[in-house]
Structures are given as structure tokens and as C-alpha cells.
Amino acid sequence: MKKIQLIIATALSVVVLAACEKSDNVSVQEIEGTYVGTLTGFDTAKSETRVNTDEAAIAEIRKTGNELIEVHLYSDGMDTTFVLNYYEHNNSVLVCLNGHDFENMYGHMLGQGHPNGGMMGDMRKGETEWTHHLRDEHQEEDEHFGGFDMQNHTFGYQLNMMDGNTPYHLKFQGKKE
């Protein structure tokens, strides 16, 4: 009887460890690639530098570091590249600004909310990477601008732009090729 209990306990340990194992590499491989879609301007003001209708656009996503991706987004009207942090959250991978962009948006450096060292070193039971990031790095009213729907293989992101002193927004939405 003790042998059976030991075998069951060992089997359960393997199942639990496999279920808790971080699937970071799988998600990054799944989000890397080319997304074909549209770039839409939300504003009503007219300007030569803005996209005011749907415009065909492409976002090329590639991993550049630990929990970092580079987004090269281009269309006939624009061409930009930026780096984002990514965090798994259930059936999604959500993104957040990085470096100086994070500091300019939220008023502090990324990582200041992690007292125990590493970014995910103090995760609580039941937290996703995203909910942990929100708890440690953000206030309730902080905005976020996009991410990946893993079931539909789509990527959406809102770019906050300036035309002189006038802010405007562009929204990319695309599906992975």
C-alpha cells in the first residue's frame, strides 16, 4: 500500500511540476512573426502626418531579450520600431512599455516595484505574469495599449503620437501570417 501511495505521490508531483512550469519560450515562439492588418487613426483633425482612414500595415515581431520583443510596424504612411515587455495572461500575452517610454508614461522606472530582486521572483499563488506586473508596477488608473490574442493569433496595439503639440492615436490590428 505504501508503494502505491509513493507512486501516486510521485506521479502527482510530476503533473504539478509540469503544470507550474513556465511556458515563456512557447508563447514567444507563438507571438514572433509577421502580422498583417490595418492602421487606423482615431482623431477627427486633418493633418498630412496622420492616418485618418484604415491603411494596410504590417507588424513584424521578434524576441530581443528576456521578456522583451521588438515591434517593427510599417505602412505607406509610417515606419517605426519600438521595444515592449510582454507578460503571459491566460489566453493572451499582454504588452507594456519599456525603458524610458515606461518611465515617461508612468513616472518611475520599470522594476522599482519588485522588492525581491527579479521581475517575477515574488509572484503570488494564482497570479499570472500580467497580474503580477500590474500589482508591482502600476497604479489602478494606468493605461495599457495592446497585446496578443493567442487563440485568434492576432496582435493589436495603440500608438500614442504627437503632431507638434497635438496628441493623436493610431491603432494597429493584425493577424499572424
Image (tube, rainbow, N blue to C red):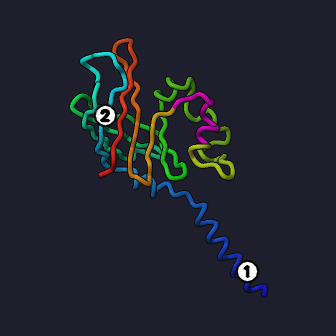
* Horizontal side of residue 113 vs 173, given as left or right: right
- Left or right: 58 as drawn, with respect to 10: left
Residue 113 sits in quarter: top right
Check if residue 134 falls in the magenta segment.
yes
Residue 78 to residue 152: above or below: above
Circle number at residue 6: 1
CA neighbours of label 1 inside 10 A, class few (<14), some (14 to 19), many (20+): few
Name the quadrant containing residue 156. Answer: top left
- As helix, strand or loop, the secondary structure at mark 1 comes to helix
- Say if 176 sits above or below 75 in the image: below
Residue 176 x %, y %: 33, 50
Magenta highlight on residue 95: no
Looking at the image, residue 38 sits to the left or right of residue 169; the answer is: left
Snapshot quadrant of residue 22: bottom right
In this view, the mark in front (2 or 1): 2
Decide: few, some or many residues near mark 2? Use Cα within 10 Å; few <14, some 14-19, many ≥20.
many
Q: Position of residue 120 (x, y in %)?
A: 60, 46
Q: Which residues are magenta?
A: 132-143
- Label total for image: 2
Mark sitting on residue 32: none
Amino acid carrying label 1: it is Leu
Point out residue 8 in the picture as x, y percentages from the top left corner.
70, 79
Disc with the residue nearer the chain's start (2 vs 1): 1
Judged from the image, the secondary structure of the residue bearing numbered disc 2 is strand
Under mark 2, the amino acid is: Leu
* Residue at the image position 48 percent from the left and 47 percent from the top: 93
- Image point 41% across, 32% down: which residue? 158
Q: Provide the residue designation for mark 2.
A: 39
Indicate the position of residue 174 as horizontal and vertical percent values.
33, 43
The Cα–Cα distance between marks 2 and 1, rounded to whole angstroms, is 58 Å
Residue with the most extreme top position: 165
